[in-house]
């Protein structure tokens, strides 16, 4: 969690994902795949000319393009540590994912935020376990529906490509759904407090009921 002050305005609240062993392992795995692709190309170039050599070179080049791009992105995400969520006096900002430029950020102005909703998906004890989400709701009508709707219907708020007649504005809300990552450098409670210090809106907790 970090903040940058400016004049008399409230500090910008930024949420970043901390580097984890999983992200470092992903970089290492991609680096090994890139090296293997280099080995395929080298083997094809130095081996006897023929169909086998062409196949080795082709597979190696494809691997370099695919795994090399993945490695660059993984390293950029790991080192760049671009925020996943920003809050300021103007609204909620979803920073564009690296390597897209920051001018591609999306902003939801505070006047369009009627409420926040905390949701939980998944089942305890399963391989995926449970996942918490924070959703910014665009209207008071949707907020009131979310308060009383069955939990099974609330899944639509976390899936941008799913719509349901019971939650007609779910698709708009899903565009402003954030999966709460355990690696975030701010807790869900801290994010909610930062939102309410800038825009006094109700918080609907549907994680258990």
Image (tube, helix red, strand yellow):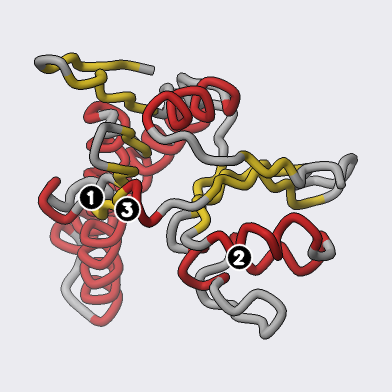
Question: Does residue 50 appear anywhere in the picture?
Answer: yes
Q: Residue at 47%, 34% (x, y): give it.
A: 200
Mark 1 is surrounded, within 10 Å at the Cα level, by few (under 14), some (14 to 19) or many (20 or more) other residues, namely some
Q: Which one is nearer the viewer's eye here, 194 or 185? A: 194
Q: Which one is nearer the viewer's eye here, 117 or 28? A: 117
Q: Is residue 141 above or below residue 166?
A: above
Q: Position of residue 129 (x, y in %)?
A: 78, 43
Q: Which residue is mark 2?
A: 142
Q: Earlier in the sequence, mark 3 or mark 1?
A: 1
Is residue 154 shown left or right of residue 69?
Answer: right
Q: Residue furthest bottom?
A: 165
Q: Residue at 44%, 38% (x, y): give it.
A: 26
Is residue 83 shown left or right of residue 177?
Answer: left
Mark 2 is surrounded, within 10 Å at the Cα level, by few (under 14), some (14 to 19) or many (20 or more) other residues, namely some
Q: Residue at 37%, 35% (x, y): give it.
A: 27
Q: Which one is nearer the viewer's eye here, 83 or 147? A: 147
C-alpha separation, residue under disc 2 versus residue under disc 3 = 16 Å
Q: Which residue is mark 1?
A: 38
The image quarter containing residue 64 is: bottom left
Is residue 161 shown left or right of residue 49?
Answer: right
Q: Residue at 44%, 62% (x, y): give it.
A: 175
Q: Position of residue 101 (x, y in %)?
A: 11, 49
Q: Is residue 150 above or below residue 130?
A: below
The quadrant of the picture occupied by the N terminus is: top left
Q: Earlier in the sequence, mark 2 or mark 3?
A: 3
Q: Nearer the viewer, mark 3 or mark 1?
A: 3
Label 3 residue SS: strand
C-alpha separation, residue under disc 3 versus residue under disc 1 = 45 Å
Contact, mark 2 vs mark 3 (Cβ under 8 Å): no
Q: Which residue is mark 3?
A: 108
Q: Is residue 136 above or below residue 198?
A: below
Is residue 198 shown left or right of residue 62?
Answer: right
């Amino acid at each position: 969690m970090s903040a940058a002050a400016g004049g008399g305005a409230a500090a910008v609240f930024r949420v970043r994902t901390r580097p984890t062993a999983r992200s470092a392992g992903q970089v290492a795995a991609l680096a090994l795949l890139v090296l293997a692709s280099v080995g395929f190309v080298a083997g094809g170039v130095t081996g006897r000319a023929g169909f086998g050599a062409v196949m080795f070179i082709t597979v190696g080049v494809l691997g370099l393009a695919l795994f090399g791009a993945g490695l660059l992105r993984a390293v950029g995400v790991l080192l760049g540590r671009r925020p996943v969520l920003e809050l300021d006096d103007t609204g909620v900002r979803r920073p564009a994912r690296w390597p897209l430029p920051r001018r591609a950020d999306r902003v939801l102005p505070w006047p369009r935020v009627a409420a926040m909703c905390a949701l939980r998906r998944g089942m305890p004890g399963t391989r995926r376990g449970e996942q918490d989400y924070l959703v910014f709701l665009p209207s008071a009508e949707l907020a009131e529906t979310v308060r009383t709707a069955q939990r099974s219907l609330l899944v639509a708020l976390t899936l941008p490509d799913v719509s349901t007649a019971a939650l007609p504005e779910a698709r708009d809300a899903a565009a402003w759904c954030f999966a709460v990552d355990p690696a975030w450098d701010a807790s869900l409670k801290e994010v909610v407090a930062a939102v309410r210090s800038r825009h006094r809106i109700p918080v609907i907790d549907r994680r258990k009921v």
